[in-house]
Structure formats: C-alpha cells, structure tokens
Amino acid sequence: MNTKTHILITVIISIATLVICPLFYVSSILEADKTETPQGLLQEQIKADNLILAKSNEDLRIMTFNILAHYKSWGGTPVEQRCNLFFEVLNGFTPDVLGLQEMCLDWYNALIKTKSIYKFTSPVKTAFPHKMTAILYNSETLELIDCGSTPFTNSVNFKTRRIAWGLFKQKSTSECFYVVNTHFSFLEEKEKNENFPIQSCQANELYTNIKSLYSQYSYPIFIVGDFNTKRRAKYQKDVVDTGTYGILNSVLTDAESLAKNTFFGENANLKETLNDHIFIYGEAYVKNIYLVSKNELKALSDHYPLFADVYLKNTS
C-alpha cells in the first residue's frame, strides 16, 4: 500500500468515526431517556392538571418546594439525575413565585446556568456565601421591588435555617404582595419536647419579621416553607392547633383553610403527613391548593411541591 492510499484510507476512517460515533452516542442517550425518565407521562399529567385548575391571568401561583440537597447524609442523590424532573414541574405549572428549601450548591448551579424566565431574588447573596433557602420568581409576570434575607438566631446552621423575602408587583394587575420563604429546624420525634423551644423561637422570629414587613407596606404576605411541623400529627389526630403549627396558625391563616378547591394528589394526605405549608398574613383569596404528589416525583425529593392559586382582589 503506497503512502497516498494509506493517507486516503486514514482520512475516510476518521470521517466515518466523526460522523457515525456521535449518532450511536446520541441514540443511546435518546433510548436511555425513553426507558429511564418519566418525563413524557409527567408532562401529560401536568397538562391535564392545568386544565382542571384553570388559572387566570389575574391569579398568582405561589409554590413551596423542598428539593432535597444532594448530600448523601440527607438522602439526596446527585442533582444531575433529578434536575430534569424539577424543570418539568417549574415549566409545567409555571408558578409566579417559588420558595426553595435545601437548595445546595449543585442545585444552585443547575438553576443559575439555565436560561429561563425565572430569576433569583438575590442571586449574589444566595450564592456567596451559599444560602439554601431562596426565592425564584417569574420575571415575565412579576416585577421585583425589594428583597432581603436573615438567619434565625436560634439555629445550628444559618444557611439552611433562615427567612428570605421578596416584595413583588404583579404586571397584569399592578397589585403588590410579599412572599416569605423559610425552613424551620428539624426535630426528631423522640426529641420534640426537649427541642420544641428551638422551633417556637423560630416561629416567633418569623412572625416578628412578617409584622415588620407589613408595617412598611400593608400588602398581603404569603409565607411558604418547610416548617417541619405537621398540621395534624398522627398521634394527635383530633387536635389541630398543637405544637409549632398551632403557634403559626394562631397568628397566620393557613391557605388550605381558605381554598375553594383542594387537590391532594396521589401519594400524600395533605392533612396528616405534610410539613410544608402556605400561610397568609393580610387579605387575599385562595382559589386552589394543590399538593403535587405524583408517583414520578418520588425520584426528585422526599417532599412534594405544594402551591396555592390566589388573587388579591375579590372578583368572585
């Protein structure tokens, strides 16, 4: 074989490798997507849900979601294995405001790199030093007026246990409102009595912050988060206003109690097993409460997203 022929064969093989190998690689990814991810089914379910919910342009959709940090000690798997499911929820239900808890650095990087209509209220402060309780808002439907964040004084980890807030104007109605997002300390069942003062102190600090915001502008305030306290504990099914939830419910209004329509989803009982809540301070009207407990979302987090469709003027 002469040199020219050898070079020609080498070039042909190289071209074939560049063209054919990527096709096999892409094909394997597509096949993996078909067999390993439930996105197609989830998309159809979300479309069906939105038809039932019938959200209008004047409604606000306020969501809370503990997305589970990737730390193995917390039970989280790598974010890259889960983020597509998160974006299905975000882009499918299109909340106006989303309060996030357990947003580890991997989650932050996944969210900040995505070109999206959703923005962090404080991207720089959220990242440096990294804060795990943050707020995303839809920049097409809302204008961010002001925002802030403060840690609880009675807490082991200031990054995970804090209060974040944003003041927004709804572009379609020019109505203003606050969203406050928080994450209370987790109390082991056997340590509830001993550590209850930690949560009660956080509840009092939260309420103090809410009153301070309301004193500046008397706009409705929606308080979302993982409160690590249940509306009705399993061992006290006949008692609602107990523990930290009782403290909160005595000064705030649970949006679920005002909702015209309540949807529980498939896998969770809203009244017994939920640590996530949406409270209201001030006047607002609640059309829907929805706990999105889809089977497909078990792979995403040990919490399900919870949202309320609300409106600020009584148009009924």
Image (cartoon, rainbow, N blue to C red):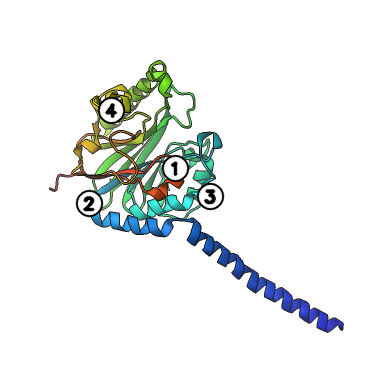
Tell me the quarter of the picture where residue 101 sits: top left
| Foreground of the two, 313 or 192 | 192
| The N terminus sits in image quarter | bottom right
| Element marked by disc 3 | helix
Mark 2–mark 4 Cα distance, whole angstroms, equals 26 Å
Element type where label 4 sits in the image = helix
Circle 3 residues within 10 Å: few <14, some 14–19, many ≥20? few
Element type at mark 2:
loop
Count residues near mark 4 (Cα–Cα under 10 Å), then give few for <14, some for 14-19, many for 20+.
Answer: some
| Coordinates of residue 196 in the picture (x, y in percent) | 38, 19
Res. 55 visible in picture: no
Determine which residue is flagged by label 3: 80
Specify whether 234 is left or right of 102: left
Cα–Cα span, label 1 and label 3: 13 Å
What residue does disc 1 label? 301
Q: Which mark is residue 58?
A: 2
Q: Secondary structure at mark 1?
A: loop
Return the residue at label 4.
Answer: 211
Between the residue at mark 1 and the residue at mark 4, the CA separation in whole angstroms equals 32 Å
Counting residues from the start of the chain, the first of labels 1 and 4 encountered is: 4
Mark 4: which amino acid?
Answer: Lys
Residue type, mark 2 in image? Glu
